[in-house]
Image (tube, rainbow, N blue to C red):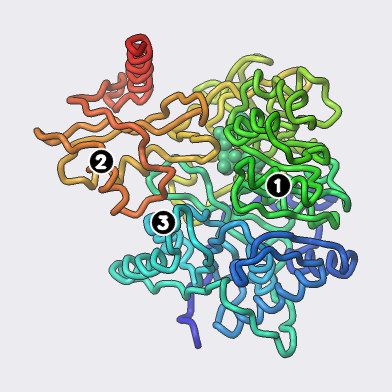
Amino acid sequence: MSLPRRTDPEPVTGWPADVAARYRALGYWRDETFGAFLATRAARHAARTAVVGRSVHTGRWARLTYAELERAAIAVHARLRAAGVRPRDRVLLQLPNCVEYVTYLFGVFRSGAWPVFTLPGHREAELTDFCRIADAAAHVLGGPGPRGADPRATAQRVAERLRAAGHVPPLVVDAGAALPEPGTAPPPADTGPEEVAFLQLSGGTTGTPKLIPRTPADYLYSVRESARICGVGPDTVMLVSLPAAHNFPMSSPGILGVLHTGGTVVLAPDPSPPTAFALIESERVTMTSLVPPVLQAWLPAAGRTSHDLGSLDVIQVGGARLADAVAARVGPDLGARLQQVFGMAEGLVNYTRLDDPDDIVTGTQGRPISPDDEIRVVDGDGRDVPPGAEGLLLTRGPYTIRGYYRAGPAGAASFTPDGFYRTGDLVRRLPSGHLVVTGRAKDQINRGGDKIAAEEVEGHLLAHPRLRDAAVVAMPDRFLGERVCAFVIPDGPPAPTAAELRRHLDERGIAGYKVPDRFEIVTEFPVSALGKTSRRELRRALADLLRSNTERSP
Ligand code: OOB
C-alpha cells in the first residue's frame, strides 16, 4: 500500500538562536530524541514492568516490560513504514487508555512522524480540523470511543468531509489489529532533538483549534525536571486515569516522566473510584494525577471502599482550579500527599513542592519548574502590576512555545512581540514565587479540566438555520467548576428547543463535552462599550438567573 505524498511540515516560530544556545549551555536542552529515549530505557530496565493496561488488540489486561515495549514500538514503526508513513508526516493518535497508546506513541516517534495528540472524545468536527491543519497522513485509532462510539465510523465521516473540501483523507491504522513480527527492525528514523517532534492540542480560545509544536529538547527538559521535582523513580507506580493524550498525564511528570526513570505506568480505562481503587490495590500504585472533579468523587468514596489505598503516596491535582477547602481534605481522607499542578500544553508547568508547607500546598497552584521560566503579571495594557496584585500571566522559557503550528494571525496574537505566551490566566504571585490562580480572561470554559473555546461552539450554533446569534459562557458548577451555557437569539418564533439545538450540534459532529449543558433563549445580547457582545454581562445575567432559581426552589 502506498500513501499519497504529504506536504512537508511548515516552519514554526522557534526560540531565538542566542536563547536556544543559552538553554543548551545550561544543560536544559540535550541531544536526546524520543526514539533514543525508549531504546536507552529498554537497555537499562529491560526486565522491569513499563506499562500495565488493557489491550485493544486482545481485549485483556496486558503487562509489558521495557524490552517488550521497545519491541512493540519497533513493530509499530515497521507497520507504519510499510504503509508509507515517512519522517515528519503527521499522524493522529486517538486511542483510549490502553497499552497500545504507549506502543503506538513510541512507534510513531521511532518512525520520525509527528503524533498529533487527539482526545478519545474528539469527533468528526475536531478531527477534520486537525487533519486539515496538520495535513495528516494517518489516523491511529482503536477500541470503542466514549459512550460506545465507533471510531472507525467517525473516521469514515472525517474522510467524507475532507474529500468534499478537496483534501486527501488520512490512512486509518487500527491499533486493535495484530502487529506483524518485524523481519528486520527498521533503523530509528526520528528527527533531531531541536526539531518539532509532535503536535499537542491547545485548549483554545478561537473558532478553529490550535496545534502546539513541541521538540524533544524542550519537552524532555520539562519531563526530567518534573520527575525530579515530583520524586519519581524506579519504584514509582503511576496510575494514569485521565486521557493519556493530555499534557498533564503525558509529561507532568506523567507517562514520560515515569518511563524516564524506569518506573511503571498503569493505564486505567476510566477514573471512577471502583476502577481506580481496584488498580491502586492490585498494582500498589504510588502516585496519580487527577482533575478536581475526579478528586471530589474520590474523597467520599475513599471512606467507604474496602480496597487498600495504603500504597498511594502522592496525588497530583491540576487542569482546573482546586478549591482550597477540597485541597485540605486530601491528606486526612486519602492518606496521601497533595501536589497542585498548574500547567498548560503550550509549556509552563507549576508544581507545589513535596516539602512546601501545608498552607502553600493547599492555597497555591505551585511555582514554575525552571529557574529560567520567566513570569510576568501584567494589567490590560501590558504593564507589570505591583508585587502580589492580580494580573494577567505572561510567560516564556525553555519549554514554552513561541508560536502555534500554522495558526496565522489569530495564533500570533497569543504571543507578545518579545515572545511571551499570553496564558489568559489571572494570577497573583506570592513573594515565594508561588502562583495563585484567581480567574481567567480568555473566552474559554474549563469544564472540570476539559477546555472549550466559546467561539468554536458559537460557530457551530450559528450554522443552525433558525438562530440569529449565539454566545457561549461558563456557568459556575459545584462539581465540575464550570459548565457550558449558550445564550441564543432565535430568528423569529418559534425558537428551536434545547433538544433541537443539541441534535444540531451532534450532527455537526462536535465532542460531547463541548455541547452546552444549558440553553437560554433571549431576544438580544448586552453589548460592551465597543459594541461587541459582552460575555461578562451574560455571565452576570446567568449568575442572577441561577441565584433566583435557587431562591425559588424549596
Ligand atoms: C493543563 O493544560 P491545558 O493546556 O489543557 O490547559 C491549560 C489551562 C491553563 O491556562 C489554565 O487556564 C487551566 O488550564 N489550568 C488551571 C490549572 N491547571 C490548568 N487553572 C487553575 N488551576 C490549575 N491548577 O490543564 C495542564 C497541563 C500540564 C499540567 C497540568 C495541567
Indicate the amino acid at tag 3: Arg
Mark 2 or mark 3, earlier in chain: 3
Mark 1, residues whose alpha carbon is within 10 Å: few (<14), some, or many (≥20)?
some
Secondary structure of residue under mark 2: helix
What residue sits right under mark 3 in the picture?
A: 123
Q: Nearer the viewer, residue 110 or 250?
A: 250
Q: Nearer the viewer, residue 238 or 541?
A: 238
- Name the spot of residue 242 as percent of width and height, x first: 61, 46
Quadrant holding the C terminus: top left
The quarter of the image that holds ligand 1 is top right
What residue sits right under mark 2 in the picture?
A: 499
Q: Quadrant of residue 534?
A: top left
Mark 2 vs mark 3: give the one in front. Answer: 2
What residue sits right under mark 1 in the picture?
A: 278
Secondary structure of residue under mark 1: helix
Q: How many marks?
A: 3
Q: Marks 2 and 1, how far apart in space? A: 38 Å
